[in-house]
Structure formats: structure tokens, C-alpha cells
Amino acid sequence: MKIAVTGGYSSGKSSVSAVLTTLLDCFFISADIACKNELQVGATGWQQLKELWGPDYFSEDGEVDREAVREKIFLDPASKKELEAILHPLAHRQIVDAGLRADVCDKHLVAEIPLLFESDQSYDFDMVIVVSVAEDIAISRAMRRDDVRASLATSIIASQLPLAIKEARADFIINNDGLFAATYSQILFFVADRIEKKK
């Protein structure tokens, strides 16, 4: 089974994906990690971004200035679309390849894709999990985790599809508002109800 994990900003997608990957002993791929790899010096995404934006968003040793890029894309919607047009197809290729490898090895695939519904890329998943969290909790967690200002966290959330729309398109919703023990119980239920029953 190919499972996509998505949700709102700072909702706990990575934590849910990590538990699922452990429980299922499956292949895992993260769209965020794929995109970060594409921004490493010399990678295809890095080359395309440098050609598009020039040297202002790169350090002297060629590294992408991630903080400057993050500020730019969430304050300038056009720049965000430019970056996504570079990275999303590259990440899509890696995710599709991971799915093919999972098929060959007869394993499940868990793919963490934060912008699954926002992306123009086409995917073929058997199950889509949306990790849900209240906006105020997401902002608080983002400020602690990413050391960002509340205003930037709010802008990031506003730039994505409303959580209610994502939930409406989900096959399964995991609420991560409270203690992770409660979230873990929901993951166990998902595995038992949506995967084990289908064996």
C-alpha cells in the first residue's frame, strides 16, 4: 500500500510518518528532504534556482541561504511559485521512484508530502492521511521548533490550503492537538483498521 501523509504547517506530519514507518517496516520518503537535497550545492534544483534568482540568495561558498529564501517565498507569492516550479517536479520524481522500489520489494510506502494538495504534481496513493492540528497550537509549535516569528508562521499557514479542505479530501484524519500518546493510539487504529484488515 502507498500511503501519503500530509496536513497543515507544524501539524506533526514527521512524527506520524516516523511511527508509521516503524510499525509497518516500510519504505519512507519525505518531500521536504527530497527538496532540501535538491538545494545542495551542485544539485539540479540548486543550479536552476541560482540561474533564476542569481547569487543574492547564496553564501560565498555556494550554499543556499535558507533563511533568506524562506522569508522571500512567504512574503512574495510569485517567488514561492517559482521555487515550487523547480522543486516539486524533482521531488515528485524521487517519490515515484520510491514507490516503484517499494512495489519491487513488496513493501508499503509512506510518503510525507506537506503540499500534496497544493502541488500540481499527480500522485497515485492508496491512502491519504491528513494530520490535523488547531492553528494556535501549530503556530506555537512552529515558533519553538523553527525559531520563527508568529507572523511568519501565520503567513506560512495562510499560504496553504485551509485545513478543512485537506481534511475533506483525506481517507483518514489524525488529530494531533494533544499529547502524542493520543496521536499514537490513532496511528495504531489506522494500521489495524485500514491495513491489517486488508491482508
Image: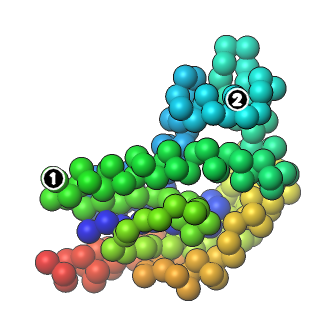
In the image, 16 versus 198, the foreground residue is 198
The alpha-carbon separation of the residues under discs 2 and 1 comes to 39 Å
Q: Name the element at disc 2.
A: helix
Residue at 58%, 63% in the rendered image: 120
What residue would you read off at disc 1? 105
Q: Position of residue 97 (x, y in %)?
A: 33, 49
**Residue 107 shown left or right of residue 3 in the figure:** left
Residue at 73%, 34% in the rendered image: 52
Task: Mark yes or no: residue 95 visible.
Answer: yes
Looking at marks 2 and 1 on the same chain, the residue that comes earlier in the sequence is marked by 2
Q: Amino acid at mark 1?
A: Cys
Q: Amino acid at mark 2?
A: Glu
**Residue 153 shown left or right of residue 11 in the figure:** right
Q: Quadrant of residue 192?
A: bottom left
Q: Name the element at disc 1.
A: loop
Residue at 51%, 73% in the rendered image: 130
Quadrant containing the N terminus in the rendered view = bottom left
Q: Quadrant of residue 39?
A: top right
Q: Position of residue 23 (x, y in %)?
A: 27, 61
What residue would you read off at disc 2? 51
Q: Quadrant of residue 22?
A: bottom left
Residue at 32%, 50% in the rendered image: 98
Quadrant containing the C terminus in the rendered view = bottom left
Q: Position of residue 137 (x, y in %)?
A: 69, 67
| Mark 2 closeness class: few <14, some 14–19, many ≥20 residues within 10 Å | few
